[in-house]
Image (cartoon, helix red, strand yellow):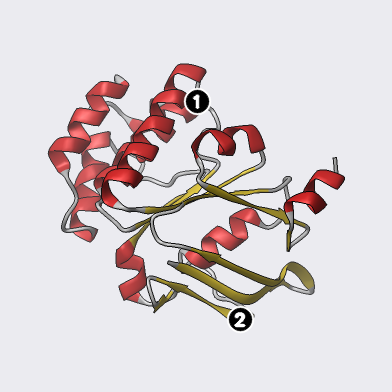
């Protein structure tokens, strides 16, 4: 379970999130939709323990999101991925293996092949979509209880998008994994998510309120 309790986050004097409360039950594929600048990525970084709240608390599997115990339980996939200059898919898999002892390297290599990604190819030469595919493979193989995805479908062509959709749904179902996906495309979230929420200008809205915004 992910518990977000009365969370406020400001940057300088700008309130990015204001009194956000949200509970995501275990085993849920939860989609959080909102326009650009709504605070989605900030909330995801707070859940991942990258940012600290100014007010309120976030717990992941009962642990404070900033704790090492919580970070071991989750895999965070940002919209813009980070890697070393000379990284290859295989070296990135080896890196994650050092952090996640349960990382399934053989399954990771299988998924790389399925996506058509050379495991020794330079990641710097990959398109945005190819990088997304590689990190989706890593996220699935990390073996965590929680997966946080920021705009996971952005940059993917329709065929790969469907493949990623099925991989995430099947993995979540098979392992009881909790997945939190943020996006500004409601249609994409409706295809994969078992529950969804709406974020607008740093506040959680009810679905009818979101629809009134047009």
If the image is split into quadrants, where does the C terminus sit? top right
Q: Residue 49 has which mark?
A: none
Q: CA distance from mark 1 to mark 2?
A: 35 Å
Q: Is residue 206 above or below residue 167?
A: below
Tell me the mark number nearer the camera, choosing from 1 and 2. Answer: 2
Res. 117 image quadrant: top left
Residue 2 location in percent, x, y? Answer: 47, 67
Closest to the observer: 129 or 195? 195
Taking the image as shown, residue 14 lies to the left or right of residue 93, namely: right
Say which label, 1 or 2, has the lower sequence index: 2
**Residue drawn 35% across the image and 34% down it:** 167
> Is the C-beta separation of discs 1 and 2 under 8 Å?
no
Taking the image as shown, residue 53 lies to the left or right of residue 139, namely: right
**Residue drawn 33% across the image and 37% down it:** 170
**Residue drawn 80% across the image and 44% down it:** 211
Taking the image as shown, residue 208 lies to the left or right of residue 82, namely: right
Res. 113 image quadrant: top left
Q: Is residue 173 above or below residue 11?
A: above
Q: Is any atom of residue 127 visible in this view?
A: no
Q: Residues within 10 Å of mark 1 (few under 14, many from 20)?
A: some
Q: Residues within 10 Å of mark 2 (few under 14, many from 20)?
A: some
Q: Which residue is mark 2?
A: 56
Q: Residue 156 has which mark?
A: 1
Q: Is any atom of residue 60 visible in this view?
A: yes
Taking the image as shown, residue 138 lies to the left or right of residue 20, namely: left
Closest to the observer: 139 or 191? 191
The kind of secondary structure element at disc 2 is strand
Residue 154 location in percent, x, y? Answer: 55, 32
């Amino acid at each position: 379970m992910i518990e977000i309790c009365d969370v406020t986050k400001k940057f300088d004097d700008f309130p990015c999130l204001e009194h956000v409360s949200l509970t995501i039950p275990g085993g849920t594929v939860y989609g959080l939709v909102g326009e650009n600048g709504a605070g989605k990525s900030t909330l995801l970084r707070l859940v991942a323990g990258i940012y600290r709240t100014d007010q309120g608390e976030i717990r992941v599997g009962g642990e404070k999101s900033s704790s090492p115990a919580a970070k071991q339980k989750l895999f965070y996939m940002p919209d813009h991925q980070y890697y070393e200059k000379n990284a290859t898919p295989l070296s990135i898999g080896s890196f994650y293996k050092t952090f996640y002892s349960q990382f399934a390297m053989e399954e990771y290599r299988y998924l790389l092949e399925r996506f058509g990604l050379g495991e020794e190819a330079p990641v710097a030469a990959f398109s945005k979509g190819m990088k997304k595919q590689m990190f989706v493979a890593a996220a699935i193989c990390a073996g965590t209880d929680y997966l946080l995805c920021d705009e996971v479908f952005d940059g993917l062509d329709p065929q790969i998008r469907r493949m990623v959709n099925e991989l995430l749904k099947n993995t979540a179902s098979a392992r009881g994994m909790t997945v939190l996906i943020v996006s500004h495309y409601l249609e994409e979230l409706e295809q994969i998510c078992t529950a969804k929420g709406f974020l607008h200008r740093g506040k959680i809205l009810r679905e009818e309120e979101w629809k009134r915004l047009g």
